[in-house]
Amino acid sequence: MNRRGFLLGFSTLALAVRGASAALADSYPTRPVKLIVSGVPGAAIDLVTRALADKLSAALKQSFIVEDRPGAGGNLGAETVARSAPDGYTLLVALDTTLTVNPSLYKKLPFDPDADFRPLAILASSSTMLVVHPSIAVSSVAEFVAFAKTQAMPYAHGGNGTPGHLSMEYFRMLAEFPAVSVPYRGSAQLIGDLVAGQIKLGFVSTAAVLEHVHAGRLKALAISAGRRAPQAPHIPTLAEAGYPDFRVELYYVMMAPARVPDSIIDVLEREVVRALKSPDFQDRFRAQDIAIEAITGVAVKNRLVADRALWAKVAKAADMRVE
């Protein structure tokens, strides 16, 4: 075959591939799509995913079915999707910690967070709040840090690698004060002990403690996120309180198996963003301290990579491990 014939053949093949890709996008989805959620029924990530599934089902005229698969810090759900066919019919909605923290916590993961997945979108995020019992005579982050440097206070969190644990250990790295980690198995007991003064410090889900803060049963010093909570706009972020590098948010990320075709990714990104940006969707979750993000493309991968590097440093400094 001469050079002209080779180029003609290559061009014909490229056109055929583009045509097949376009046809695939035009027909997708032709059967129900499964959304594997690495959370429990009723959790915030589950509620956001179900609301999104309803929107996608209506827009794409096909069922999007939510299947909760919690366990092992999200590893079970992630493994399921990593091993599924790369056809766009099995997708993952996970807490970012599954992909950013778990590589530092677990000696061996059943998936590769880079090689096995293709980022689709960051759906939403939520924050934690630095709270103390009212018996602690501080009213600002600066006063708290000065007080904390005089003694190693116990602090409550939900276990290795949970947002409350990560937030406090990162804060300790920046502010350089001692503290004693006290893990809990459930948020109800954790918050109950904080309110009762059995333990007097912690980063806790903002939505879970706002009622106690407004009632004066707990004292809020700062928000972990890069934004103030709409329900408590008077409480500063830790960045505003003197730690400009501090930003910790728990975010929900949608991922596809690595080899899903571009044409299907394009369809999903377009419809996910359209759903998330609809006013009714955003209004639905605002009161729960869930900020709708609608971030897609390379920005998703960049954030995951940056957060993975940060949490690797924090996990090493705090000796966080899951055996």
Image (cartoon, rainbow, N blue to C red):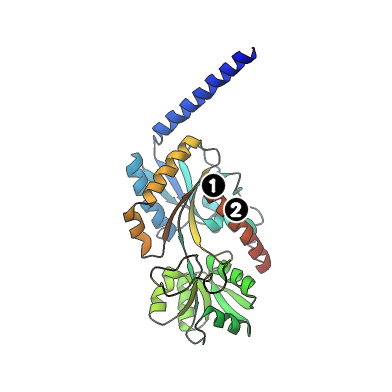
Amino acid type of disc 1?
Val
Q: Badge 2, how many Cα within 10 Å: few under 14, some, many 20+? A: some
Residue 105's x, y, as percent?
A: 63, 60
Residue 38 in sight from this viewpoint: no
Which residue is pictured at 47% across the width and 45% down the height? 91
Amino acid type of disc 2?
Val
Residue 131's x, y, as percent?
A: 49, 77
Depth order, front residue of 136/191: 136
Image: 307 above or below 263 = below
Query: Judging from the image, what secondary structure is the residue with disc 2 in?
Result: helix
Residue 119 in sight from this viewpoint: yes
Q: Can you tell which mark lies on residue 205?
A: none
Residue 285's x, y, as percent?
A: 37, 60
Please tell me which of labels 1 and 2 falls first in the chain: 1
Q: Is residue 74 left or right of residue 269?
A: right
Which residue is pictured at 33% across the width and 59% down the height? 283
Rounded to the nearest angstrom, the CA distance separating label 1 from label 2 is 11 Å
> Residue beneath label 2, please?
305
Residue 244: name its quadrant: bottom right
Residue 124: name its quadrant: bottom left
> Residue beneath label 1, please?
298
Name the residue furthest top: 1
Query: Judging from the image, what secondary structure is the residue with disc 1 in?
Result: helix
